[in-house]
Amino acid sequence: MTTPGSDPLRTSTGTPGTTTGPATAGPATTGGTARPERHPVRNAGRTLALALLLFVTVLLVLFVVYNTQTVEISLVFADVQAPLVLALVIAAALGGLLVGLAGLVLRARRRSS
């Protein structure tokens, strides 16, 4: 019989009330249910995604730092001055929007025919 608060599957660290983990090589359990196995491929994918996100973030910060000069932009109705990075980001966003809209139009045409 075990004393209240003790777990025969855990080893004692010497300090009362603390344990180090399972004493057996079996799967870890919490509340009677087995923990799901970790998938190395899924973890590698998450690590790769995090590394790619960090890389893109660094590139964007460098892009902003090196493109701070003010440029004059000629619009149809007016001339404005804005930081170069702002002009480039707006142009890229508008380009992406046009590509997305063109994709939607093509998809709608395929569905209707």
Image (cartoon, helix red, strand yellow):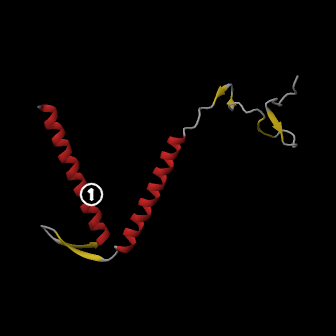
Residue 90 vs 80, above or below: the answer is above
User: Residue 95: image x %, image y %?
Assistant: 22, 57
> Of residues 23 and 108, which is closer to you in this image?
23
Q: Amino acid at mark 1?
A: Ala
User: Residue 67: image x %, image y %?
Assistant: 34, 73
- Which image quarter holds the C terminus? top left
- Which image quarter holds the N terminus? top right
> How many numbered tags mark residues here?
1
Which of the 4 quarters of the picture holds residue 12?
A: top right
User: Residue 16: image x %, image y %?
Assistant: 87, 40
User: Residue 45: image x %, image y %?
Assistant: 48, 46
> Of residues 13 and 81, which is closer to you in this image?
13
Q: In this image, 34 relative to 81: left or right?
A: right
Q: Residue at x 32, y 77 (%)?
A: 69
Which of the 4 quarters of the picture holds residue 40?
A: top right
**Circle 1: element type:** helix
Residue 71 vs 37, above or below: the answer is below
> Of residues 16 and 34, which is closer to you in this image?
34
Residue 61 vs 95, above or below: the answer is below
Q: Residue at x 59, y 32 (%)?
A: 36
Q: In this image, 109 relative to 5: left or right?
A: left
Residue at which label 1 appears:
93
